[in-house]
Image (cartoon, grey):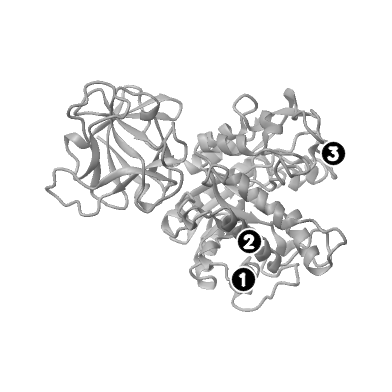
Amino acid sequence: MDTYTRRIPKPMIGMNWQPSPSDYASIPPPSKYGDTDFANDDFAALWGASGRNDLQKIKELGCNTIKMYTIGHPAPNGHWMRNHKGFFNRARELGLSVILPISNYFVGEAYKNRTSPPSNPLDIKSMVFDMVAEVYAEGNPGSAIIWAIGNEYDLIPNGAYGFFEASDIATVASYVIDAESKLQITSDNALAFTSPVSAATVPLNKSIPCFPPFNSLGGGCANNAIIQEFTKRGIQPQRFIASVDIYEVRQQLVNYFEAFPRVLPNVPMFHGELGWSAADGGDGKQAENIASQFSTTVDLAQKGSYFFGACCFEFSDELWKGPPNTSETKYGIYTFSGQLIQTASQGNHSPVWGAQYPVDNLAQRPAVSAFINAVLSSPPEPISTDGKVVTIESVHFGGTFMRLDGRGVGAMSNSGGGKVDCHKGAQGWEQFLLREIDSGIITLESKFFPGVYVRMDGSSVKTSSGSGAGVVNAQFGAGDYEKFRLKPMQQGEYAIESVRFPGVVIRMDATGVVPGDAGGGTVNCQLGAGGWEVFRLHYI
């Protein structure tokens, strides 16, 4: 897997989240919502554990990814003084990957600066630097996986508000790269770029060259224009992953999956928007089509090496997009119940000074159950608090299993003890009791050495490393260092993430391990999950 896509879950099971409150029912938005950025501390009552808990709901839907449309210029330099750290940390706690938007506002201003510079132009480069610096505040990207630069530029006609061109997308990408350089971000911590486009074959944006074979594929011309501009700027082509917004079902999705690599070979892709409006045929039709869409894309993501998955459009209705009950206002799989959970306040800072907003109670549409059933059509075997016996096989090193040698581990030690390594084949020392001790939190107890658990110390793991880092060994009894989450990757495959050290996962290097060895190789830690950090669990 390429350096820039190794963090992206596969299949990507994503959710578009733009939780516009019920009093944001027309444009322009109420001034208290400013840049309509809700993924920050001012709006924690929408997404946080002590509020409506949208991120937890998204996790419970079976999602592994969240995609937004706006993250504003952060504090301390941003006008709205937004702080996104709490949101990023909450996503990481839940095992949700984040697609980070650099919205049309910023890219449109970059176009203005290029074509008709105002007397006092916005310093978009400095704003992008602040965004990148906030994401890498701890030296790594945490839950972030992709920079999404702009949205559907192919549908913005020349001369319309917010217009920009492919060259401006490349300019903003170059600003991100410049910020990475200044912040000394290594390539193994850099993120992929995307710019979501529509599935239109003929763009409304006439700056986009359109010719065969690209005009035979929805989004083909728009994506090709971005790739060409990246190439001109010397931006590595492997940093680009295409994102195509599409609203097809069943066979049309299969047809697109088959056509895409013929037109854009060697380009990875996901569907940034995939959904159905409840206004178009009712709640039942929405549920039926979403079930079809996501059962199809989850299956295709496992078959095609270039295709990663899709993000459902969308979590909740956005009333501002049109008159009541029109198509654009009813894409949410959740809708407004008409009741409030609470009225919350933004932070006591300029310029919002505690402005209040409603935390609406959301009602499920039938599409919620349809989505869950589609993405979890082959759910993992349920975990018992009494423990299920499992073996843990490396996907990269097939036939090689995690092994725990618990000899001499008879009491709790601050640094742990024993040894966790690799073994060809699974026998007694390769068997573990997997117990769920809290919602989504597990322990791995050796079946051969009762009371001895897999332990991870990821305190030294601050960046991805080719050889891994940190310590995975054994401990008598289970504390914080012995608690993990199973992070779904492909169907039936998981990364094993530390609860104590979010984002840090177990890594296995079984190079040189052969049948008959007593145990060997290396089991340690890695920041983010690539091929060597993915496992299959076999229930015995």
Question: Residue at horizontal 62%, vertical 50%?
Answer: 132
* Residue 366 in view, yes or no: no
The dot on residue 31 is 3
- The residue under label 3 is which amino acid type? Ser
Q: Residue furthest right?
A: 119
- Three-letter code for the amino acid on which mark 1 is drawn: Arg
Q: Position of residue 177 (x, y in %)?
A: 59, 60
Mark 2 crowdedness (10 Å alpha carbons): few <14, some 14-19, many ≥20: many
* Circle 2/circle 1 CB separation < 8 Å: yes
Checking the image for residue 233, the label placed there is: 1
Q: Is residue 406 in sight in this rendering?
A: yes
Apparent side of residue 3 relative to residue 192 in the rendered image (left or right): left
Alpha carbon of mark 2 to alpha carbon of mark 1: how far?
9 Å
Badge 1 element:
loop
Element type where label 3 sits in the image: helix
Q: Is residue 268 above or below residue 313?
A: below
Marks 2 and 3, the one that precedes in the sequence: 3
Q: Which residue position is annotated with label 2?
A: 173
